[in-house]
Image: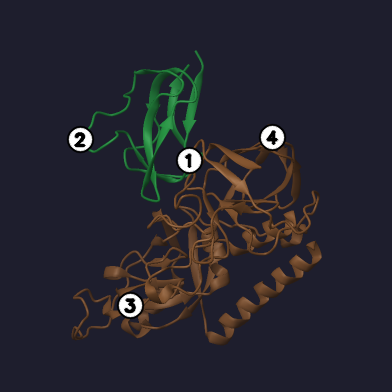
Chain colours: A green, B brown
Amino acid sequence: MGSHTITSRTPGVFYHRPSPDAEPYVTEGASVAEGDTVGLVEVMKTFHEVKADAAGTVAKFLVENEDEVTIGQDLVELET
Amino acid sequence: MTIRVQDPGLETTVQDTGRLGYYSIGFPPSGALDSFAYHVGNALVGNEPGAAALEAVYLGPTLEFTEDTVIAVTGAEIPAFVDGEEIPTWESVAVSSGSVLSFGQLRGGARPYVAVAGGIDVPLYYGSRSTYTLVGIGGFQGRALRAGDELAIGSDARDPKAGRRLDAGDVPVHPSTAEVHLLVGLHSYRLTDDSLARFTDTEWKVTPDANRVGYRFRGAELEFVPREQPFGAGSDPANVTDCGYPVGSVQVPGGVEPIVLLQDAVTGGGYATLGTVVSVDRDRLAQTKTGDKTRFVAVDLDGALEVRKDRLDALDRIRSALS
């Protein structure tokens, strides 16, 4: 088992879910394929999907919902 | 001869020196936010000074060229690649037909610029090729680029040549705390003396609400001098009777989260203007990103004119050296 960390490509505000009353994109323990959406980052009033750049199981979220994040910040740890 | 947009990046738009002369009827100038990076890019590829270029933010676009040409990447510190090979930035580079320009992760600054020999050929709208996305005019169909767009390349090339390079000493550095000069006024009297001092003492943090219209900051609360609400003004202590907003002007609705208006500014309204960022320092603001810090350094009018003259003289010197 290896691990892989998904990082943010833009600065902004991180969200777990597509809209406030929707289900989260993924939860800890879920398996994701490469290209799956795992969260959103809002910047300049636009939303950008955070995509898994590897396949694996979501081990841990490294940021809270609505945390401000910077470019390159670790967002989600995957077990691969 | 075209550029095919394989991936648009984030809010990548066509920009030039801007659409000047229509502010009084509610049209902001638009145009490249980092004017230095834009002008140097054109000089590097041997374009006429007003040729249109691409401005991106945070993420660069992925672009395919359908003919041999010369390009230059300037602005933010970001790795740029042609067909996967890293290319120097602030230097003109030859690209071949079929070559693909792509970008890595931003290291500093916020906005990369791509200049192309000949300029981006979109129709002139009120004298400019700049995109004003809020109302959908200018640039490429009045909007940010999308995957699949094909941009024509113009004929504004004077002397395209690869290998022109900006001297290392002239390459702007983008510290995570930017300093910008502020000419205090028009309504600075509305703030208490303490609050006006606090404004220039505070390291302000750029919020996620930071785009071509304006940048919103967080860091302190400011207090206004009590007053009787004048006729025509709103009830917020930050309100004044409506007036024009200079590009670069600073307003503080509610005394929290100051806003600096940029090239896609709203042109007027009812918030007190406590000062205006010196025009050439908007380049520095344009290269700050969400989470970065900014300090405002107060200058008087003579000081502001000097800051502007120094920067424009430097640009003139660079242009002659590159021509």
Left-right relation of B72 to A69: right
Q: Give the residue at mark 4.
A: B99
- Rendered residue at 24%/76% (across/down): B237
Q: Quick one: which residue is furthest to the top in this view?
A: A1
Amino acid, disc 4: Ser
Q: Say what secondary structure mark 4 lies in.
A: loop
Distance of mark 2 from mark 4, alpha carbons?
A: 45 Å
Disc number for residue A21:
2
The answer for which chain carries disc 3 is B
Q: Residue B183: percent from the left, percent from the top? A: 49, 80
- Using the image as rendered, state which of residue B131 and residue B104 is in the foreground: B131
Q: Chain of mark 1?
A: B
- Are labels 2 and 1 assigned to the same chain? no
Q: Secondary structure at mark 1?
A: loop
Q: Amino acid at mark 2?
A: Asp
Q: Do marks 4 and 1 both belong to one polypeptide chain? A: yes
State which chain disc 2 sits on: A
Alpha carbon separation for disc pair 3 and 1: 38 Å
Q: Which residue matches tag 3? A: B272
Q: Is residue A63 left or right of residue B51?
A: left
Look at the image and tell me whether residue B173 can be seen. yes
Among numbered discs 4 and 1, the one appearing first in the sequence: 4
Give the residue type that dot 1 points to: Arg
Instruction: Give the numbered dot on residue B146.
Output: 1
Query: In this rendering, is residue B100 above or below B145?
Result: above
